[in-house]
Image (tube, rainbow, N blue to C red):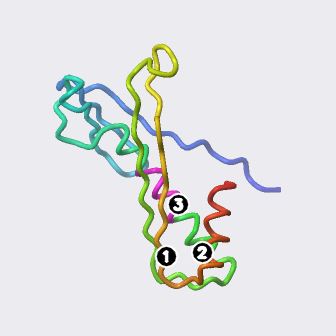
Amino acid sequence: MQPAQQPTVVRARTTDIFGRCALAAGQDRFFVDHPATQEGPGEYAGTIDHFLTGVAACGVLMLEYQARLRGIPLHRLEVAAEGVRGEPGARVEGRSLFERAAVHFEFVGPTDEQARVLVEHYQRY
């Protein structure tokens, strides 16, 4: 019997600077800012940056692992995640949603077919 999975917990709290929060994730501590256009200091990466960073990191780590499991040579993988946020309330009242989002993969090592298989795995999971 496998042990029960523990939830992943990250914490965020306000700081003495309006528009900045302090975060704790595992052993890492960092700040997230609202941009100056939203009355934040804009000195640190914002929420969208961190969200897209998670998407890109998931892509790299998931496909690196899948390449190993499948015996696919992977010398290097770069993932770029980009998103364009719409105006608040443009599509759903009171919410700001992504108008467009895309993930781009750049592989060194796999054949085109092997890279396609890896990207399809990412898209499914």
Q: Position of residue 42 (x, y in %)?
A: 19, 36
- The mark that comes first in sequence, 3 or 1, is 3
In this view, the residue in front, 22 or 114, is 114
Of 111 and 16, which appears nearest the observer? Answer: 111
Q: Is residue 68 magenta?
A: no
User: On screen, 13 above or below 125?
Assistant: above
Amino acid at the residue labelled 3? Gly
The numbered dot on residue 107 is 1
Q: Which mark is residue 115?
A: 2
Amino acid tagged 2:
Ala
Q: Position of residue 5 (x, y in %)?
A: 68, 48
Q: Residue furthest top?
A: 93
Q: Main secondary structure of the magenta part?
A: helix
Instruction: Point out the frontmost of discs 2 and 3.
Output: 2
Instruction: Answer above or below: position of 39 versus 5.
Output: above
Q: Dot 3: what SS?
A: helix
**The residue stretch that appears in magenta:** 53-60
Q: Quadrant of the C terminus?
A: bottom right
Earlier-in-chain disc, 2 versus 3? 3
Name the foreground residue: 26 vs 116: 116
Q: Dot 1: within a 10 Å radius of its alpha carbon, few (fewer than 14), some, or many (20 or more) residues? A: some
Circle 1 sits in a helix, a strand or a loop, which is it? strand
- The secondary structure type at the circle numbered 2 is helix
Binning the other alpha carbons within 10 Å of mark 2 as few (below 14), some (14 to 19) or many (20 upward) gives many
